[in-house]
Image (spheres, rainbow, N blue to C red):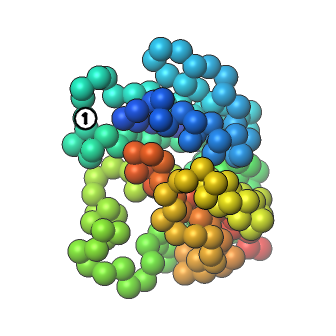
Amino acid sequence: MVLGALHHLALVVSDRAQSEPFYDQVLGFLGYHQVESNEEFTLWWSAQAGGISITALPSGQHSEEGGQGAIATTKPWAAVDSGQGVDTNALEGASLSTTSTYDSASFSPFPEGTPVGSPEDRLRKSLGLYHVAFCAESQEQVDALYDLLLAMGANIVEAPAPYDHYAPGYYGVFFTDPDGIRMEVVHMPLQP
């Protein structure tokens, strides 16, 4: 892996038995394979993206966020080189919400006009993780995952749609896991 790339995603969930089938289907769709399941954790692996694991809170324990865990991820943001552009070789399996030249001053992961005090506004102003985004190679893959999520009965936050206010060509679906951890699958062609 590249220096500075994140190596793995570790999730703490409130009910591992409930969350494991959700992650097995979603991560399987994304190309991960379950490689280990023991008393402590379940681990999925992708040779291109690294590992994602879930573990449960100890019995009777609840986080202040109602069971939501902390997240880290696998390989994504290593592609930005001090604002001078993007190393597309480092983007394989990555999720990078930007065009070929990253301008942190103009990038915003939140829709324009998000009402102050709304649940979205409060969520984005809270400490910790806002959401995790995974890459798709096409809009059709985003739509196919959406169909799978509907079949699973998953909570859909935003149906697949273009989000050009994020970046040109940005197309994604937003959803939550059984504990309410926000996730996204996005297709965003890199601009020349």
Q: Residue 70 appears in which quarter of the rendering?
A: top left
Quadrant that contains the N terminus: top right
Task: State the residue lying farthest toward the top.
Answer: 39
The residue where tag 1 is placed is: 62
Query: Which residue shows up at 31% across the image and 23% down it?
Result: 58
Assign the C terminus to one quadrant of the image.
bottom right
Give the total number of marks visible in the rendering: 1
The answer to which of 110 and 87 lies nearer the viewer is 110
The location of residue 171, given as percent across then percent down, is 65, 71
For the point 45% across and 78% down, which residue is it?
Answer: 111
* Residue at position x 26%, y 78% in the image: 116
Does 26 sit above or below residue 130? above
Q: Within 10 Å of the Cα at label 1, are there few (<14), some (14-19), or many (20+) other Cα atoms? A: some
Q: Is residue 133 visible?
A: no
SS for dot 1: loop
Q: Nearer the viewer, residue 84 or 18?
A: 18
At x 38% / y 85%, what residue is drawn?
Answer: 113
Image position, residue 87 (x, y; %): 70, 56
Residue farthest to the bottom, as pictured: 113
Provide residue 140's location: percent of width, then percent of height: 77, 65
Three-letter residue code for mark 1: His
Residue 160 in the image: state x and y as whole percent: 62, 70
Quadrant in the rendering for residue 188: bottom right
Left or right: residue 111 versus residue 44 is left
User: Quick check: can you spot residue 75?
Assistant: yes
